[in-house]
Image: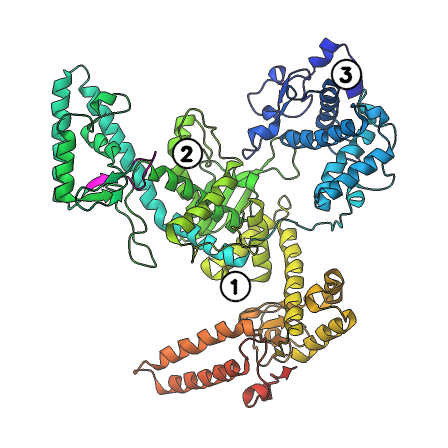
């Protein structure tokens, strides 16, 4: 029986139809108790398996739709989209996408009503849908976004046999697609997710690794300390239950005195909060300095008092206690935070990376640690957000050799891409930093997981009863909060830790950006800055063997796509620099320069920076495909002349062996200004070795020759240009290193 036949039943029978008629449900969900067609709210959470799905994305509220005819039409189209597959058109809508589909549909329905004066799909014609397409263009929407909104118009026609009344009587834009109507130049396989700029990704990854490897121990130890203090307080309160209040006061006062004595013995001060809260501050009676208030919460923990449950026991209100604390402050001073957990030294400064913890700062740092661990997992594994957030306790396994050496770190999770329902259990090979992040997550999530009875590695860490259990889409907010936290705590307005984006505003992080960015770096910068921060060779190997090597992931294809895009981007940099007056150096300079100049000539008289970029990409495509960016020179690879292949023992190599590059001899090499730092580092390191007095003379002579060789290259790379100077002499000239203007 078709959807139309089912919906044609009587009102009561139609309203009783399950919204999800055949979709798989989460374990434990009974189809008899899921949302029905006539319900004022459709809750499709039972059909959503992804842990990263937001609750608001899987519900539809019909009660807020004032026009009953629009609400009825919306029910029809959503029910059809959720339950009907149309080969050659669209597959069934995933339950997790129902809210987005509803919003896009309502936009068109509201337009129809505004145009006709009342909602009536039977009166919709080609002229009206043309006006709708035009309104989307006038709204300034990107063509891709407009195409997504136009799909509903096509659906209302294609699904006509599954819609009782909410259908179009004509075929809109015959023979065209939503992309075509919207004017989108869709390129199959092109990833439109922005790549995180290297200037942002480098410090973001560095600080994330620092949190996982350095700061995590302090944060986890502070949580353990706070748990111990709360447990001790609760035991004291239980033991003294039923005692006379005066007796309890005396015991609490003695514990307060013992606490002050302990602080005195260890050279510590009376704790104050890290930051003022609820507008409360404290003015120091001796210095007049305005500080955060006294941390009575920590003092109460040591004294065995729960002031929230028994406000009358608050030491700030007790007779004599405020005077005692004031005298202790006059003697010992104050200490920010006040918890006992030692703070590790910052690897750069050698100083503690933060002040001591308190009960308000600790939950914040736990969330920051969770965010840092996410960045490490997402960027260094290439896993999708849904796959990362499906990880559970015990997901990490280690393969060791007979001598105990770790051979492989493996992650077990669920892949959802291209899978319906509950996805498919899959294994990824990863590297040590990811394994360490997972270990941190296991410890970080234990408390919240136990409290909520879940094994996810991504619980909401706050234990308030009114919070949801899983981080899910909230991770995006956390990631950007982490970016701001790094700038607030470790940077300044003049020198932010995470720099702004190209538009001068903070770069907005999303979960999809990490996969694309790591694919680009693996493909195009195997010797780049980020590569130097991690076990990069292993990262690349792991990604290909464990993730990209799996047909279920598609990561290998993504890396290759990013390689092609990266090569085009890099050759356009060459073109723009040359048009700005830069010259090219190296044996390949003439060959490359001719191609660039020919393209510029054919594009004239357009200025370089506003040239027809799509046409330019096509013109330079062949040259771009040979470009491989290297640390000492860029290689425009030609296997017939590549010197590195003569030294390689690997037969049939399809690309350059960058580690065997001979940049002043190989006919494929181009040296640019961007390579100067690498050459300079080589010279500096050699000069440092030459200072060693016990250096053997043969080695000294060799190093001196190397310094002279490097110095000649440096002198020939003109500052502010992309090329060595003219007038080269010596071994570089003999080797074929030359300049082209």
Horizontal relation, residue 276 to residue 266: left or right: right
Of all residues, the one furthest to the front in this rendering is 288
Residue extent of the magenta highlight: 270-280
Q: Quadrant of the C terminus?
A: bottom right
Pointer 1 and pointer 2: residues touching (CB < 8 Å)?
no
Task: Characterize the local packing of mark 2: few (<14), some (14-19) or many (20 or more) Cα atoms within 10 angstroms.
Answer: many
Q: Is residue 259 left or right of residue 681?
A: left
Quarter of the image for residue 222 reads: top left
Along the line of sight, the residue nearer the viewer: 716 or 404: 716
Please tell me whether mark 2 sits on a helix, a strand or a loop: loop
Q: Is residue 415 above or below residue 695?
A: above
Which label sits in the foreground, 1 or 2?
Answer: 2
Q: Is residue 431 above or below residue 285?
A: below
Q: Is residue 160 left or right of residue 521?
A: right
Of helix, strand and loop, which one carries label 3? helix
Could you give the CA–CA distance between mark 1 and mark 2, rounded to whole angstroms?
36 Å
Q: Residue at x 47, y 52 (%)?
A: 204
- At label 3, counting other C-alpha atoms closer than 10 Å, the crowd grade (few under 14, some 14-19, many 20 or more) is some
Instruction: Name the residue that disc number 3 marks.
Output: 6
């Amino acid at each position: 029986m078709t959807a139309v036949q089912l919906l044609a039943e009587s009102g009561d029978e139609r309203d009783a139809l399950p919204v999800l008629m055949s979709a798989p449900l989460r374990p434990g969900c009974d189809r008899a108790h899921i949302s029905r067609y006539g319900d004022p709210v459709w809750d499709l959470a039972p059909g959503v398996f992804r842990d990263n799905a937001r609750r608001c994305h899987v519900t539809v509220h019909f009660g807020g739709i004032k026009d009953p005819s629009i609400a009825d039409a919306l029910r029809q189209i959503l029910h059809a989209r959720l339950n009907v597959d149309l080969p050659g058109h669209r597959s069934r809508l995933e339950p997790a996408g129902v809210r987005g589909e509803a919003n896009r549909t309502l936009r068109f329905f509201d337009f129809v009503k505004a145009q006709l004066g009342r909602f009536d799909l039977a009166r919709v014609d080609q002229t009206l849908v043309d006006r709708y397409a035009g309104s989307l263009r006038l709204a300034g929407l990107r063509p891709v976004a407009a195409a997504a909104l136009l799909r509903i118009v096509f659906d209302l026609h294609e699904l006509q046999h599954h819609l009782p009344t909410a259908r179009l009587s004509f075929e809109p834009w015959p023979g065209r697609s939503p992309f075509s109507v919207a004017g989108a130049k869709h390129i199959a396989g092109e990833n439109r997710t922005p790549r995180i700029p290297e200037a942002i990704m480098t410090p973001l990854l560095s600080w994330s690794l620092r949190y996982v490897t350095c700061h995590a121990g302090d944060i986890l130890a502070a949580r353990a300390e706070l748990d111990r203090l709360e447990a001790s307080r609760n035991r004291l309160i239980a033991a003294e239950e039923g005692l006379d209040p005066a007796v309890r006061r005396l015991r609490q006062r003695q514990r307060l005195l013992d606490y002050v004595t302990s602080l005195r013995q260890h050279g510590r001060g009376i704790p104050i909060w890290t930051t003022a809260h609820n507008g409360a501050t404290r003015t120091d009676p001796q210095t007049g300095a305005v500080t955060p208030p006294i941390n009575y919460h920590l003092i109460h923990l040591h004294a065995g008092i729960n002031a929230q449950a028994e406000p009358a026991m608050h030491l700030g209100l007790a007779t004599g206690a405020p005077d005692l604390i004031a005298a202790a402050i006059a003697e010992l001073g104050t200490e920010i935070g006040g918890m006992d957990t030692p703070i590790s030294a910052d690897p750069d400064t050698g100083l503690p990376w933060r002040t001591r913890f308190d009960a308000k700062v600790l939950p914040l740092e736990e969330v920051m640690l969770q965010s840092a661990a996410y960045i490490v997992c997402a960027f260094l594994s290439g896993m999708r957000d849904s796959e990362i957030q499906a990880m559970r306790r015990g997901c990490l396994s280690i393969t060791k050799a007979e001598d105990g050496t770790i051979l492989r770190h493996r992650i077990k999770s669920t892949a959802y891409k291209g899978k319906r329902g509950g996805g498919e259990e899959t294994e990824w090979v990863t590297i040590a930093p990811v394994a360490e992040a997972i270990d941190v997550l296991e410890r970080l999530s234990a408390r919240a997981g136990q409290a909520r009875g879940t094994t996810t590695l991504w619980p909401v860490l706050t234990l308030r009863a009114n919070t949801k259990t899983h981080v899910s889409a909230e991770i995006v907010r956390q990631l950007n909060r982490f970016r701001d936290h790094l700038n607030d705590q470790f940077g300044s307005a003049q020198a932010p830790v995470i720099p702004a984006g190209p538009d001068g505003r903070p770069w907005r992080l999303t979960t999809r950006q990490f996969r694309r960015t790591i694919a680009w770096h693996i493909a195009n910068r195997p010797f780049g800055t980020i590569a130097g921060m991690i076990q990069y060779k292993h990262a690349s190997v792991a990604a290909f063997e464990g993730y990209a090597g799996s047909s279920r992931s598609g990561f290998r294809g993504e890396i290759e796509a990013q390689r092609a895009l990266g090569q085009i981007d890099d050759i356009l940099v060459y073109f723009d620099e040359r048009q700005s007056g830069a010259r090219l150096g190296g044996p390949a300079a003439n060959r490359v320069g001719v191609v660039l100049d020919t393209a510029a000539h054919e594009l004239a008289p357009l200025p370089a920076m506003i040239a027809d970029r799509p046409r330019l990409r096509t013109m330079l495509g062949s040259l771009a495909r040979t470009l491989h960016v290297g640390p000492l020179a860029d290689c425009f690879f030609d296997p017939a002349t590549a010197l590195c292949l003569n030294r390689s023992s690997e037969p049939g190599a399809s690309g350059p062996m960058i580690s065997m590059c001979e940049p002043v001899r190989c006919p494929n090499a181009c040296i640019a200004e961007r390579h100067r730092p690498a050459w300079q580092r080589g010279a500096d390191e050699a000069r440092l070795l030459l200072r060693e007095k016990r250096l053997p003379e043969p080695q000294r002579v060799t190093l001196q020759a190397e310094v002279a060789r490097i110095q000649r290259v440096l002198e020939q790379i003109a500052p502010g240009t992309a090329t060595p100077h003219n007038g080269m002499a010596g071994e570089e000239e003999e080797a074929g290193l030359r300049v082209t203007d």
